[in-house]
Amino acid sequence: MTEKDGIEKLIRPDLASFGGYSAATSPETLKGKVEVAVEDIIKLDANENPYGCSPGVNRALAAYPHFNIYPDDGQAKIRELLAGYCGIDARHIVAGGGSNQLIDLILRLFLKPGDEVINCVPTFGIFRFSTLLCGGNIVEVHRDNSFAITAAAVKAVITNKTKVIFLVNPNNPTGTMIPRPELLEILDTGLPFVVDEAYCEFGRETVTPMVGKSPNLMVLRTFSKWAGLAGLRIGYGLFPEKIADYLLKIKMPYNVNVAALVAVEESLKDLAYLKGNVDKIIAERARLYEELKNIKWLKTVPSQANFILCRVEKGEAKELKQKLQQKGILVRYFEEPRLKDYIRISVGKPEHTDALIKALKQIEKTQ
Ligand SMILES: Cc1ncc(COP(=O)(O)O)c(C=O)c1O
C-alpha cells in the first residue's frame, strides 16, 4: 500500500465522490490561450460589477493604518452600519466573508448527516456544495419550463428530515422571481427558509422588512454585485435574533477581514454613486436583452438580476462558450443536464455588449 492510499483511507468516505464547485475561469489562466491579451478579456461570467467599487474604498484602503490588528470579532460597527442600510436592528445581522460563508454557517447550524435540504433547481451551486460537505442530502424541486417555482412543489417534498429550504430571488442563473404569495406560502411551512437576495438591488424587491417577524426567515445579501466588492469577500445575513446569536457563536473568529470592513463603511457613504452604477446596469440589461433577442438562434429568459440566461438553439452551448472565450469574452456554461443548452451572460458596460454582439455575429457566420 502506498503512503497516499493510507492517508486517503482516513478521509470521510462520503466525500470520495465529491465533485467540488466549478468556479468561473480566471482570466490570468487564459494567458497565451486566447486571441486577446489578458487585460483585454471581457469578463461576463461571474455577475461581477463592471464599474468596480466606490473610489472612496480605494482611497480608504490605501490610507488604512491598522492591517496588523485583528478586526472586531463581534462585528459591532458593521452590524450597526448594515442596520442603517437595511432598516433593521443590528441584533438580526451577521456578516461573513462573502454570503457563501453564511450559507455554509447556516447549514452547519441546522444539518446533521442524513438531514435534507430543499433546493429549487436550476439554481446557485453552493447550496448543493455546502449541503454535501455537511453530510446532508439535497432534495431537488425542479423549476418549470419558464423556470418558475411554486410553493406546492416545495411543500410536496417536505419530510421529517427537511431542515432548510433555499430560494434565490431573483434566481441565479435564471434571473426569475418567485411571486410573493408563493414565497409567503413557503415561509408558512415554519421550516428554516433562506431567501438569498444576492441580486435584489437589481430586482428592487426584498423581504428584509419581514425579518424578525417570522421565526424561520433568513435573508442573505452581498456586497459582491451591486457594490462591486466581489474580490474583498463581504456578505451578510438577516436572521431571527436567536439564530444570529448562534451563528455568531459558531463562526470562525475574525471571519470578516478589516479591508472588507473599511470597504463596507466607504460604500455605504457613497450610496448615490453605487446606486447610479446599479441604474446603469439595469438600463444596460434592457439593451442587452433586446440585442440578444435580435440573434434568432438565442432565446433569452427575462431577468431581474445583472445577467441574462440564453438558450442556444443552433450549435452547442458549450461550444459557443468556448468560441466566445477564444475571442476574449467569458460567459458562463454549466455542466448540468437541465442547463446544457444555455449560457449565462453577465450585464457589462455598453462597450462590452457591443463586443459580445459583434462576436456572436462573427460566430454566426461560421455556424
Ligand atoms: C445566489 C447567490 N448567492 C450568493 C452568492 C455569493 O456571493 P458572495 O460573493 O457574497 O459570496 C452568489 C454569487 O454568485 C450568488 O449568485
Image (spheres, grey):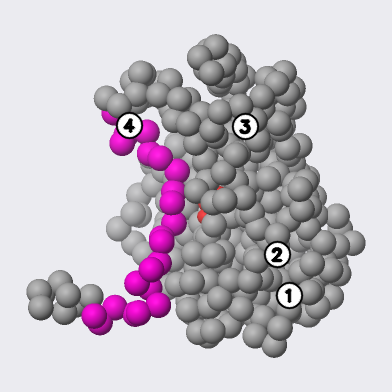
Q: Give the CA separation, mark 2 to mark 3.
A: 24 Å
Distance from Cα at disc 1 to Cα at disc 3: 31 Å
Q: Secondary structure at mark 4?
A: helix
* Looking at the image, residue 328 lies above or below residue 16: above
Amino acid identity at mark 1: Val
Identify the mark nearer the N-term, 2 or 4.
4
- Of 149 and 40, nearer the camera is 149
Label 2 sits on residue:
141
The residue indicated by pointer 1 is 157
Q: Which residues are magenta?
A: 9-31
Cα distance in 3D space between marks 1 and 4: 43 Å
Find residue 120 and report its image quarter: bottom right
* Residue at 63%, 71% in the rendered image: 139
**Which kind of residue does numbered mark 4 sit on?**
Leu
Identify the element where label 3 is drawn.
strand
Question: Badges 2 and 1: C-beta atoms under 8 Å apart?
Answer: yes
Choose the circle earlier in sequence order: 2 or 1: 2
Is residue 326 shown left or right of residue 264? left
Q: CA distance from mark 2 to mark 4?
A: 36 Å
Asked whether mark 4 lies closer than 8 Å to ligand 1, one says no
Residue occupied by mark 4 = 30
Alpha carbons under labels 2 and 1: distance apart: 8 Å
Q: Report if residue 29 lies within the magenta region.
A: yes
